[in-house]
Image (spheres, helix red, strand yellow):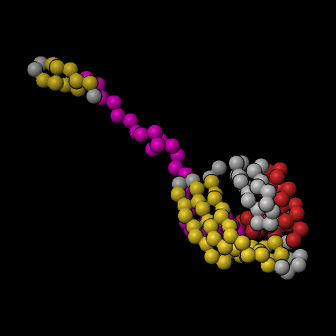
Amino acid sequence: FVYVYEDGDWKIAHHHSSQMPEEVQPKKPVLSDQEVRDLFNLWNDALATLDPAQVAARYSKEAILLPTVSDEPRTDEERITDYFVNFLEKKPQGVIKQGMVRSGEGWAKDAGVYEFTMGATGDKVLARYSFVYVYE
């Protein structure tokens, strides 16, 4: 406020009011626990296609993949795709055994234990997992 003294009283000469910038930004979605778990199912469905490019397309532009059966971190689309070339030869399908979901505006996290059945051999691999999803 800017006040001026007029006719024996203080009067408002200037008053500015505007919405806070964080309120102007479009809201990003907050997912339910089931919607977050459905994102895992989309990824698992991509595995079933046996197409490394389809699986890699599920990852964000700045993804970090710490693979289940490789000790090499993958941080770009080319290296993520490369990992799935070999992994998909085993014909994996995952089942979440136990997990916890947390989410907020434009992000979600699903972490726990999953088990892969390798369709090519019948072998099972039990592993910890964590997926962090971002809205792009």
Instruction: Say which quadrant the N terminus sits in.
Output: top left
Image coordinates for residue 109, horizontal then vertical, percent:
60, 62
Q: Which one is nearer the viewer's eye here, 39 or 75?
A: 75
Q: Residue furthest left?
A: 8
Residue 34 counted in the magenta span: yes
Where's residue 74, x and y in %?
Answer: 77, 54
Q: Residue at x 65, y 64 (%)?
A: 130
Query: Is 67 part of what is drawn in magenta?
Result: no
Residue with the most extreme front position: 71
Instruction: Name the residue rendered at 85%, 65% in the picture.
Output: 87
Give percent across and percent down for residue 7.
12, 18
Residue 54 visible (yes or no)? no
Residue 103 horizontal/vertical position (percent)? 54, 61
Q: Is residue 127 visible?
A: yes
Q: How many marks?
A: 0
Quadrant position of residue 120: bottom right
56 or 21, nearer to the observer: 56
> In which quarter of the view is residue 129 placed?
bottom right
Residue 23 is left or right of residue 4, and the answer is right
Q: Is residue 39 left or right of residue 4?
A: right
Image side of residue 77 versus residue 29, left or right: right
Q: Magenta stretch? A: 13-41
Residue 73 in the figure: left or right of residue 30: right
Image point (51%, 43%), residue name: 25
Residue 55: name its quadrant: bottom right
Say which residue appears at 85% left-offset and 81% top-offset.
122
